[in-house]
Amino acid sequence: MQVSLQISDISKSFKDLKALKHISLEVRENELFGLIGPDGAGKTTLFRILASLLLPDEGQANVAGFDVIKDYKQLRKNIGYMPGKFSLYQDLTVEENLNFFATIFNSSIEENYDLIKDIYVQIEPFKKRKAGDLSGGMKQKLALSCALIHKPKVLFLDEPTTGVDPVSRNEFWGMLKKLQKKGITIFVSTPYMDEAALCDRIAFINQGEILQVDTPSAIVKNFAKQVLNIQTPSIYKALRVLGSYQHTHSIYPFGESLHYMDSRKDFDWNEVLNHLKNEEIKDVEGELISPEIEDVFMELSRN
Amino acid sequence: METTIKATNLTKSFGDFTAVDKLNFEVEKGEIFGFLGANGAGKTTAMKMLIGISKPTAGDAMVANYKVSTQADLVKKNIGYMSQKFALYDDLNIKENIQFFGGIYGLNAKTLQQKYQQVVENLGLENYVKQLVKNLPLGLKQKLAFSVALLHQPKVVFLDEPTGGVDPITRRQFWELIYEAADRGTTIFVTTHYMDEAEYCDRISMMVDGKIKALDTPKALKKEFGAETLNEVFLNLAR
Amino acid sequence: MKKFIGFVKKEFYHIFRDKRSLFILFGMPVAQILLFGFAISNEINNVDIAILDKADDKNSKEIIVNLKASKYFNVLDYLQSEKEIETAFQKGKVKAVVTFDQDFARNLQRPKTSKLQIITDATNPNVANTITNYINSIVVKYQMVNLQQDPPPQLVQSESRMFFNPALESVYMFVPGVMTVILMLVSAMMTSISITREKEVGTMEILLVSPLKPSTVIAGKVVPYIFLSLINAIVIVLLSVFVFQMPIMGSLFWLSIESLLFIVTSLSLGILISTLSSTQQTAMMISLMGLMLPTILLSGFIFPIESMPYPLQLISHIIPAKWFIIIIKSIMLKGVGFSFFWKETLILVVMTIFLLGLSIKKYKIRLA
């Protein structure tokens, strides 16, 4: 497998804030790679460095064989970049936006039409509408079309699904999979843990540090701790009881249930459930489950 | 059980376009109610009517025992509101924010001082009292914003996408606060399109094209649609 | 080239779809010219005055008639004694009082004696001065016409003639100034705002990662505004010629060339501002405080540079508007050729090259 993106030991600070701390990462050619982390983790800073928009304080990075500092001119011709907020001209129509971005990349809508076709047909009925009047999902599709118009080798998508409803999010990931089949390497960031499973490989990032890199399934499989899923109508009370339980390693609400991890290596989970019952919490049910991506992320970011 | 929000045929039209179409639902005291919908489904319009800043064109809603159509001012006095986009003034410190927002609701100086001490103690903000709010870590800032929304002990608190994009641990700490408030009897009304927020609600409603298409506990909804996650339920409904 | 044309096209879309900036672009020049032309003027018209006529003879009465007949004055009141003068001023109704001595007629024949006294309200010294001059000239004229049969008085009559603006029409003074201010505003403020807008919306990020050269971006931003500013200049000239009957003495060719030069100077200032600011608001503040005010106050547009304190005079040298005003006054009012303003032109050219070079150098190929 060829390496499409090579990041070695990148650091970047803004005044007192260390946005990135010695980041190293490899993305293979034609991979759909996800950078997963909450707001403020350093995702956007890393994206900007890779798109040659920011200079790192330390370290090096290569994108599609071009150094992000020295070969920035070549690099810019070969990447597509979609910044966090959909950067479109709000007062230009869909068609005008697309035409403009095609022109500045020395291309035209016709030239790479088959690449953007699947996406563009969905917004084509609105091509005379101003970008500012589109819904979030439409804007996202238009922005993606604009980023693809020059047939980039590597596509950088910085939080493309933030602020977009689940239906559009779902469609969007479908489009990414199709683009991947056409040979484009995709580097995407997201704050949503549930999108991690849709990537080939993911990297967890938190407070400027990479916590782990692997396939989503391997990350879950290699997790060392057991997770006890507890269900009860009185979630809040159970949360408080386990919050002060002597063997609790961590206790987090997960929707309607609680995820409990024990501080001991081996533990009898019935003991935990009994403890809850003794504290007069009713209708307690529990089972051991395989951890979710989010369990792993929280465990890693606690350390 | 006491009902704190009751919508009866709540409708809002703009010309020919009906943004909110005859909503009927009830929310009980101490309940955490999730109000979901895709972008443009009418969620925001509906919430604006419930918090008394937009008048229904037909139907009505009772919020905290007042009619939103005719008693909007009383509604506003008895509810709290927090959104992730704007909640606190970044360039004021904790005390100044509390004084300002508490002052809006007519709390006197003595009460404000008490509340301030309470909030600082409850959230463990002792090290930050001299700082401007913008220097607080995101998690603390959100907790503070929520406490500020509760200063005047409103019967209902409206939360607009309170934890979207926030890291998982902070989000959970925030939900613990929400649980606690609900446990004390405050009704919590959450509008969001983040499914991971919706999962924490006691009951959720899903809005599609101005109408409520489903309303039940997350568990029951998942069962009804034979879905693993709320995301699937949502996709099913929206199509 | 295709990229460049595409870019310019996009800029025109922006401009023509934004009603507010369109208004600033085309409404402002018209409004400003009309405002300065009609409302704000240095001339006096229909000034209320009072008369204290202690002579009450043929000569004084005739002078009073002449004063009344002129379009400048309006005799509001006749006073009875000196005591009333102060109260007349305090009431603020009259701007000047003309008093005739008791033996006015006799004194009129003798040189170097006071004949009549003009007392003016000097709360506005400029106006007071103008009023004095106007009354003086009416009296002198009367003297010359009516005392012709007598041997001419021995006093040396000072006579002033206003060159280049014989009627002292203040609109002639303001047209060059307004034109300068508007070209500066449109060019500098609008470009700086349009560049910073792209930074704010985030599209600048995409432009940066595109293969567009910085020079293409800058040229693409500048060209539409050169075009619009030229239209503005033409509108201003047409307005002043047809509405205010202002003659243009010099060559239109040089007027166009020099205007173009000044537009480019202002545009380069605009680009420089946009490289220094990251939001539209800052760009606007810098343009207004840093460009507009000095252009209005220190360019000689309203206040003569010669009467400024020395340090301010020094500062005025670095203000492009000062040189441009000298140039277009030379062309429009004096009608002189290039040999009279090549120095000023050269100064502007050097300034422009410096500013353009600086802003291209400052234009970042990356985010800050």
Image: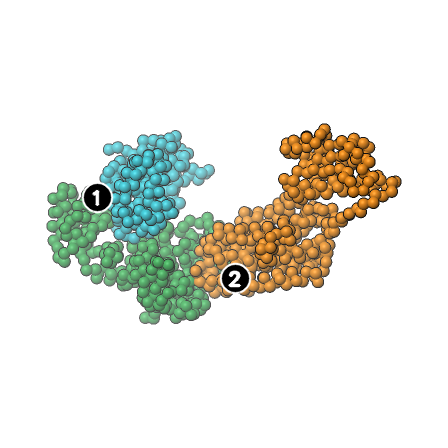
Chain colours: A green, B cyan, C orange
Disc 2, SS? helix
How dense is the environment of label 2, judged by Cα within 10 Å: few (below 14), some, or many (20 and up)?
many
Position of residue A237 measured from the top left corner of the image (x, y, whole percent): 19, 43
The residue wearing badge 2 is: C359
Task: Compute the Cα span from label 2 to label 1.
Answer: 60 Å
Position of residue C60 measured from the top left corner of the image (x, y, whole percent): 79, 34
Disc 1, SS? helix
The amino acid type found where label 2 is placed reads Ser
Pointer 2 chain: C
Is residue C356 visible to the viewer in this orientation of the structure?
yes
Name the side, left or right, on which A70 lies relative to B27.
Answer: right
Is residue A122 visible to the viewer in this orientation of the structure?
no
Name the side, left or right, on which B94 lies relative to A266.
Answer: right
* Residue located at (64% from left, 47% from top): C33
* Residue located at (36% from left, 40% from top): B100
Residue A236 got which mark?
1
How dense is the environment of label 1, judged by Cα within 10 Å: few (below 14), some, or many (20 and up)?
some
Is the Cβ of the residue at disc 2 closer than 8 Å to that at disc 1? no
* Residue located at (34% from left, 69% from top): A3
